[in-house]
Image (cartoon, rainbow, N blue to C red):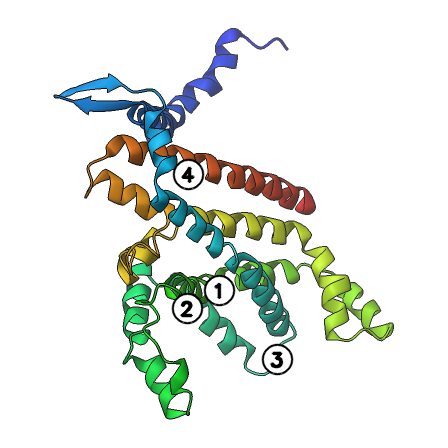
Amino acid sequence: MKISMKDKLIPYFYLIPAILMILLIFIYPTIDLLHRSTTKVISGSSQWIGFLAFQNALKDPIFWTSFSNNLRLFIAVPILVALSLIISSLIFERVRGWRIYRFIFFIPYILAIPVVGIIFSYLLQLNGVINTYLREVGLGFLAKEWLGTSSTAIWAIMFVIIWKELGFGIILFLARMSSISEDLFDAAKLDGANWFRQMIHVTVPQMTSVIEFYVAVTFITMLSWVFAYVIVMTKGGPGNRSWVLEYFIYQKAFPYSQMEIASAAAVMLLLFAGVFMFLQSRARKRLEETYV
């Protein structure tokens, strides 16, 4: 049966609203961002400045401080993967109270970032709960202003991010573990494999695609999803020691009114995130192929 041209065009007609939405939400802002990064408003009119804003951004030492802080936060990725694997494996083994543990670990993930940031801002103060406890147990020499010291501010933020984001990894890995054939674990036990060897030789190989997906998502989070933590907990301080690229863009765009530099930094952040989004899509494709 020959399909008419009208029938061929009907599916594309139904796609028009989705295409318009994509153009409005994603394509237009990206084009506008590129335009703003290569122009500057002078005397009320936009003037072409080429790649001058990119050069100025790259010459700014605070830009590299911000970028290096994002790179430091990448350390959280292997920590999150390792902790998620270990905890999800223990919960999967139905240790005593595993339902309560699953609930406790997932609760932080559904909390709003500002709420988490404010709570930990009080906990990590010089006279906060954490330092008070350290003094009571005889470890007062470890007490310090965790968010107010340049050497510890970004690491304290990373600790809070790990605490909040851990629940997602645990639930994700648990979902994958529930679909692994029990025969594989039974065979490993018959061969005398302990819990650690079962994880290395059975669990991890069976979860490779999920781990790749989680790593890509977490990298993107550490690169372009930590602004709320910084602005609530430290506001970039002390000095500029806890700035990240998102906070750099915010400061340049609004307090400093350097929209062209902020746009240029946003373009570079978009490119950095694009690399990890590509990795995420590859991991997602492999994940889908696993279940097909």
Tell me the mark number nearer the camera, choosing from 4 and 1: 4
Does the CB distance between marks 2 and 1 fall below 8 Å? yes
The residue at which mark 1 appears reads as 167
| Mark 4, other Cα within 10 Å: few <14 / some 14–19 / many ≥20 | some
Spatial CA distance of label 2 from label 1 is: 7 Å
Q: Is residue 279 left or right of residue 150?
A: right
Does the CB distance between marks 4 and 2 fall below 8 Å? no
Tag of residue 95: 3
Question: Three-letter amino acid code at disc 2?
Answer: Ile
Q: Position of residue 128 (x, y in %)?
A: 29, 79
The residue drawn where x is 24% and y is 38% is 253
Spatial CA distance of label 3 from label 1 is: 17 Å
The residue at which mark 2 appears reads as 107
Question: Three-letter amino acid code at disc 3?
Answer: Val
Circle 1: element type: helix
The residue drawn where x is 35% and y is 56% is 242
